[in-house]
Amino acid sequence: MPYNIYLKKNEERRIVAGHPWVYANEVARIEGKDKNGSLATVYDYSGRYIGKGYINHLSKILVRIFIRDESVPDLQYYKNAIEKAANYRKSLGFDNCYRVVFAESDNLPALIVDKYSDILCVQFLSLGIDLNKDIIIKALIDIFNPRGIYERSDVQVREKEGLPLRRGKIYGEFNTKVTIIENGLKMTVDLENGQKTGYFLDQKENRFALRRYSEGRCVLDCFCNSGGFSLNAAAAGAKKVTALDISAQALSDVQNNAKLNNFNNISTLQGDVFEVLRQFKREGKTFDTIILDPPAFCKSASEVKNAYKGYKDINILGMKLVKSGGFLISSSCSHYMTFPLFQNMLCDAARESGRKARIVEIRTQSADHPSMLSADESLYLKFFVMQIL
């Protein structure tokens, strides 16, 4: 008998409003018995139908709702849902590289599908989605006819679902290094070893926005990874771009991508960004534009306090190194570092650095990563452009 989940009194409000997650501590009782990962029906305390989703007794998120009517999640259901998600991106002009499916924001919780030219890279991040992998792969092949599909289900959230980490080819034969076109620039994406699914697609439009702050300027790209920001600065006619990262592989990728685009105004520098910026301060070195795009400093609510300090320290250093009238571009990809908290941190950094700053732009993730008003976890990327006076 399939699972029937009954919520405690008043616990349905957030879920009825559109949030897909049902936490185990919100449940009054569970009726029925089926295998873990199967489809469960969720009701409020009075027995009113709310929706259906896959259950996982091993996770704090007991059910991830994605059906609000009487639909059945078969092959045609997934094809329709994925096509709807893809058509939205195509309507906005996304073509060569973009996120096709963004989990909860596309009503397919725990499923990520990214497109890199004619290769797809996927993540199955919950038990229910993982059990339906074959159907989803069939739907993707029918819709996109890709040259290949690569899996990057190697993120720790799977362990909370009781799932092993996994990566590798699951369809087709292909080189895992794929050349894409982003903002008119060629880039090589390493599906096997790159960050996330190979590349940070969520910063695509922000990288293009950097161009207006780069022409004729000396630009420092901190935590540069494979050089997305550096390439856009160079394309805009930056006088000089310095790509800084602790990873030798990342800097090798920057150099290769610079060659792909025939740029000779990008140089690389290896080192711990905090230490290098302190050294620049001692040397009296300054830049016209600095980009700070660090990895997430906090991945849980308990880490916010330490993360706040880390973000503040790096932004103080950045502000001190920007020439008067220049620009500091500061970003955070941690959901727990909210927009108000991040802006407050920037205010603290400006005060402690002794610099005055004004906000020029506030941006978020690219439009292929839409966020749900009912699920604030899906709005995670902060991107502040400030002029340092």
Image (tube, rainbow, N blue to C red):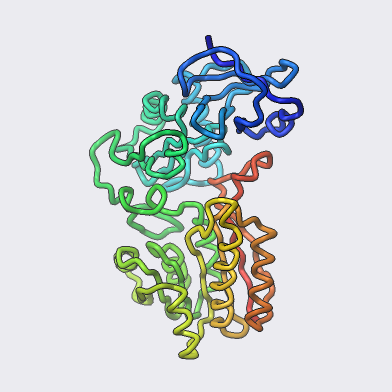
Q: Is residue 364 above or below residue 89?
A: below
> Residue at position x 69%, y 74% from top?
358
User: In x, y percent, where is residue 115?
Assistant: 41, 43
| Nearer to the camera, 301 or 136 | 301
User: In x, y percent, where is residue 86?
Assistant: 50, 36
In which quadrant of the rendered view does residue 377 lie? top right
> Residue at position x 68%, y 31% from top?
15
User: In x, y percent, where is residue 283?
Assistant: 46, 90
In which quadrant of the rendered view does residue 46 lie? top right
Q: Is residue 371 above or below residue 312?
A: above
* Residue with the most extreme top position: 1
- Left or right, 379 with respect to 141, comes to right
| Nearer to the camera, 314 or 140 | 314
> Residue at position x 67%, y 23% from top?
28
Q: Is residue 320 above or below residue 378?
A: below
In which quadrant of the rendered view does residue 174 lie? top left
| Nearer to the camera, 321 or 60 | 60
